[in-house]
Image (cartoon, rainbow, N blue to C red):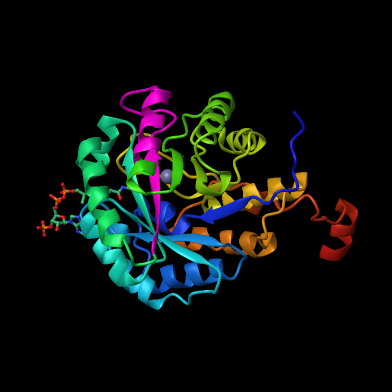
């Protein structure tokens, strides 16, 4: 099969949510707002700007209302918030989010660890959320976490994942994210499942959410793109991780993803030099190095002076 690289790849930036939710150092509301405002000017069409979950579960994002009240909304950018239940939806609607990202896990054990509910209870809560959102003009996205593997249960049956896809669609939730919460996916598995899901869903309604926990993140992106997926989550600097999944680590890194796309000729509409500059500010904000590689190495097109030129200039 020859892949058509001319179709744009949509990147949803999730650093303000997935990225910050696991950070031990408190990031002030001012700094969150500044981060989101900078991202809004970097060419993204979608930004997951926070979550409305229990502040006891995720203290790092307890200021969601204030963040959404203070960000400068860029026309054409969809600002998304993750929610686990009806209370989260009420808070998010009140805060004026554009899209609710409803999250549950395919794994019963991870859903109980993360959401303190059985999968059936999550789905029942989402029924209430659909009713609440009806007529508001809000769009809804349903995420299936641990789709490609669970740190408690191991392999997840693909039929079980398909069952949740169908239940979301039946509830009227027309857009779906398949999430690899702890980086257990491999490219062949990704291609197989994405092909299967795209038989029931247009590519404009499917997002892939990969973590780079085992170094396969961008390989999985290409595998998904080659079978028709066009929307991907990623986080600036490669931040991210679920605090309720043992061994969790960062999302695929946005600037590494955009660099890959530029190198192979896939358009993203995102300003890579701006992203790299932003990513280089993260260690100062968070107090540690971040996993992204392109911000450290620079782009292929960056040129360094030859050693002797360097000597002359430093004399
Ligand atoms: N936002 C704020 N507070 C919430 C809330 C929400 N969305 N949902 C519940 N609460 C509050 C309740 O009002 C209650 O408050 P109280 O103690 O002051 O009365 C308290 O949390 C307990 O409510 P309960 O419904 O029993 O929740 P729980 O303790 O069983 O936790 C969740 C369930 C889903 C709220 C919690 O596990 C959660 O927020 N998980 C999200 C984790 C996450 O974001 N993971 C990473 C992203 S995948
Ligand atoms: Zn994630």
Residue 309 visible within the image: yes
Query: Relative to 39, is 143 on the left or the right?
Result: left
Tell me the residue at 54%/36% (across/down).
Answer: 198
User: Where does residue 91 sit, x and y in percent of width and height?
Assistant: 26, 65
Task: Quadrant for residue 118, please give it.
Answer: top left
Tell me the residue at 33%/65% (across/down).
Answer: 135
Whether residue 174 appears in magenta in the rendering, the answer is no
Q: Nearer the viewer, residue 180 or 119?
A: 119
Tell me the residue at 31%/58% (across/down).
Answer: 60
Q: Nearer the viewer, residue 296 or 260?
A: 260
Query: Relative to 181, is 226 on the left or the right?
Result: right
The relative height of residue 98 versus residue 209 in the rendered view (above or below) is: below
The relative height of residue 93 versus residue 70 in the rendered view (above or below) is: above
User: Where does residue 243 sit, x and y in percent of width and height?
Assistant: 32, 44
User: Where does residue 94 sit, x and y in percent of width and height?
Assistant: 28, 71
Query: Relative to 175, is 22 on the left or the right?
Result: left
Number of marks in the rendered image: 0
- What are the residue bounds of the magenta stretch? 138-167
Q: Nearer the viewer, residue 307 or 89?
A: 89
Q: Which quadrant is the C terminus positioned in?
A: bottom right
Tell me the residue at 54%/53% (across/down).
Answer: 237
């Amino acid at each position: 099969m020859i892949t058509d690289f001319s179709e744009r790849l949509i990147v949803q930036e999730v650093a303000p949510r997935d990225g910050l939710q696991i950070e031990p150092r408190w990031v002030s509301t001012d700094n969150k707002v500044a981060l989101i405002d900078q991202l809004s000017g970097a060419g993204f069409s979608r930004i997951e700007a926070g979550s409305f979950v229990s502040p006891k579960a995720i203290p790092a994002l307890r200021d969601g209302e204030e963040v959404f009240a203070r960000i400068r909304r860029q026309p054409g950018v969809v600002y998304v918030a993750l929610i686990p239940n009806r209370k989260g939806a009420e808070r998010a609607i009140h805060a004026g989010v554009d899209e609710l990202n409803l999250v549950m896990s395919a794994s019963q054990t991870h859903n109980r660890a993360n959401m303190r509910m059985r999968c059936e209870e999550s789905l029942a809560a989402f029924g209430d959320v659909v009713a609440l959102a009806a007529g508001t003009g809000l769009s809804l996205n349903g995420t299936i976490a641990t789709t490609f593997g669970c740190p408690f249960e191991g392999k997840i049956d693909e039929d079980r994942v398909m069952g949740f896809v169908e239940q979301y669609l039946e509830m009227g939730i027309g857009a779906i994210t398949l999430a690899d919460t702890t980086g257990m996916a491999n490219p062949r598995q990704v291609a197989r499942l994405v092909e299967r899901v795209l038989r029931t869903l247009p590519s404009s309604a499917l997002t892939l959410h990969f973590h780079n926990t085992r170094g396969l993140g961008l390989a999985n992106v290409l595998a998904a793109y080659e079978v028709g997926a066009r929307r991907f989550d990623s986080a600036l600097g490669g931040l991210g991780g679920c605090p309720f999944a043992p061994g969790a680590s960062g999302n695929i890194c946005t600037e590494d993803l955009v660099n890959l796309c530029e190198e192979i000729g896939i358009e993203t509409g995102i300003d890579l030099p701006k992203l790299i500059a932003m990513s280089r500010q993260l260690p100062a904000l968070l107090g540690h190095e971040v996993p992204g590689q392109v911000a450290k190495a620079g782009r292929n097109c960056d040129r360094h002076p030859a050693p002797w030129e360097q000597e002359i200039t430093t004399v």
